[in-house]
Image (cartoon, rainbow, N blue to C red):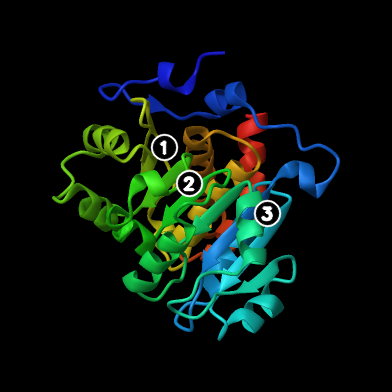
Amino acid sequence: MSSPSEMSSPSEPTTVTPALLREWGLPEPGESKKSRGEAMVVGGSTLSAGAVVLAGEAALRVGAGKVGVTADAAVADVVRISFPEAGVYESPPSGQPADAAWNDTFENSDAVLVGPGLADPGTAREWLERLAGHETGCLVVDAFAVGVFREVRRSDLPRSLIVNANLEEAEILLGRPVDDLFTDLPALAKELDAVVHCYSAVASPSGGVWRIDGGGPGLGTAGSGDALAGAITGFAARGLDPERAAVWGAWCHARAGDRLTERMGLGFLARDLVRELPAAVLDALEG
């Protein structure tokens, strides 16, 4: 099988199709939740407690076996009640490091998502600094954590890294407006030494670039980005390499939107997207 970097080039993005995803395949699920990978979602605030719930459930819906959620202490009980499938940890107070038990959980996670629902850039930067020097299977950076990503040394963060950016966040990373995602993102991915996803484009540091068609305007709804980030994290937790996790997650998120649009038109919610993800995965695998 060809490596991901051999399948595309910056000048000719590969359009993602079910046939391509079937060629890549997914790791065998095994016989227990442990064999399907463990994800951790770090985020949440009194402003947006639901973001970590959407992201964590999305990770499970694409096949991850276990999900832990780390959220502000003020909303931790809300998360426990609304997301009974998750193990819930409370964020340490500002200025204090995470405790040894949390660090062990982080380092044993197959994928960690940082950013959904965090209330401000300062809190996001503090979390990235807490993670500095620690290794995990794959780190996914989202929301406010993308905006402050350059404020933390890349060498201090895990080697396997995915940046999930919206257009505004991509422009912050570039330091200028986006001219064209399929020409701007490959250079950015190489500079950051990270897989970068933004809207319809995924780029890897090795030069691979992929185009995801579909999704439609219904994806522009509150919480949709949290569902997307969680799906990417779930695939990474299952053992896919970062570029394939990002491509699988972005395609399934778009396909879930298409499926809902066909049935409901405009107006579906992010929670609907999350629940549609298993069917989207099947669409890829069964064509």
The image's mark for residue 60 is: 3
Left or right side of 233 for 80: right
Give the image quarter of residue 60. bottom right
Query: Mark 1 and mark 2 in contact (Cβ < 8 Å)?
Result: yes
73 in relation to 68, above or below: below
Q: CA distance from mark 3 to mark 2?
A: 17 Å
Q: Residue 152, position in %: x, y?
A: 33, 55
Q: In the structure shown, which secondary structural element does the residue marked by tag 2 occupy?
A: helix
Q: Is disc 1 placed on a helix, strand or loop? A: loop
Image position of 23 (left or right of 142): right
Disc 3 to disc 2: CB gap under 8 Å: no
| Front position in the image: 287 or 182 | 182
User: In front: 54, or 190?
Assistant: 190
Measured as percent of width and height from the top left, residue 35 is found at: 77, 41
Residue lying furthest top: 1
Q: Which residue is mark 1?
A: 212
Among numbered discs 3 and 2, the one appearing first in the sequence: 3
- Residue 199 shows up from this direction: no
